[in-house]
Image (tube, rainbow, N blue to C red):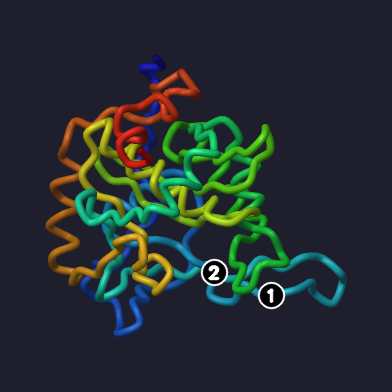
Amino acid sequence: MNAQFPTPLPPTEWQFPPATSADEHGFVGAGADLEPSTLIHAYSNAIFPMPLDPDTGPSEDGEDVEPLIGWWSPPERGILRFEDLHVSRSLRRSCRRFDVTHNVDFAGVIDGCADPTRPGGWISPAIRSAYVRLHKLGWAHSIEVWEDGALVGGLYGVQIAGLFAGESMFRRVTDASKAAVIAMVAAVESIGGSLIDVQWRTEHLATLGVSAVTQRNYLRLLHNALTSATPSLGTISDPQWLSKSQRWLELTA
């Protein structure tokens, strides 16, 4: 166990508009920075970052240009309630061939999510660097899915007390990203967390049980999660803990 995680952070230099000021698309504002304190302050206030123009390329002198960071708080927020998780019979069978871990290969997971061949990619070098730093400080965590010793899927996100804010996931074989979601639920539920935030409800995520709640309801759920005494996933030193957890075994039986 590592009692120092997550590392305490100083106050951020930035003040965000309230989440309730977001427009109909969920846009709150642009700018600020990706310092750990800024990111944790944003998540704690129902706001998350995403580049405004992820396709920004090199400048005229050949140097990469980082896209401007946008800050978002959708009017309808995608969440995954533990009791709503849907695991089909075929998915349960798929999960049995995988091994799942947490915080074993954060860099490998975020690189899988940032694969430039994936459509709609938005993870820039600055985003990658910021979340790797958050991971080292104990605020960001990865779920890895392995098959025959190879990393075939996973996801990463930010944990603040009882909140786990999922950021991105990837797969290299069928059902690997879905297995990562199931493992995430098992992990968060096992440590006593209360809120899994997936930002937006998509048709793909809806097949796993993700639903949308109003911003007002999300803010209530967020307050309850942030005031809970949930331990950090970073304090669990056994990387095989997740595969052996009672909740994972129940969900994949």
Query: Left or right: where does residue 159 sit relative to residue 225?
Result: right
Picture residue at 33% right of the left edge, 62% below the top: 47
Q: Amino acid at mark 2?
A: Pro
| Separation (CA) of disc 2 from disc 1 | 10 Å
Residue 35 locus on image (x, y percent): 49, 48
- The count of marks equals 2
Label 1, secondary structure: give it: loop
Taking 122 as reference, is 176 above or below it? Answer: above
Question: In this view, which residue lies farthest toward the right?
Answer: 61
Label 2, secondary structure: give it: strand
Residue 56 is marked as 1
Q: Residue 115's quadrant in the figure?
A: bottom right
Question: In this view, which residue lies farthest toward the bottom?
Answer: 24
Contact? badges 2 and 1 (CB < 8 Å) = yes
Residue 119 locus on image (x, y percent): 64, 73
Q: What quarter of the picture does the N terminus occupy?
A: top left
Q: Amino acid at mark 1?
A: Thr
Picture residue at 23% right of the left edge, 49% below the top: 82
Residue 21 locus on image (x, y percent): 24, 76
Taking 244 as reference, is 148 above or below it? Answer: below
Picture residue at 19% right of the left edge, 45% below the top: 225
- For the residue pair 44 and 77, the one nearer the viewer reads as 77
Picture residue at 68% right of the left edge, 38% below the top: 150
Residue 164 locus on image (x, y percent): 33, 46
Residue 51 is marked as 2
Label 2: how many residues lie within 10 Å, few (<14), some (14-19) or many (20+)? Answer: many
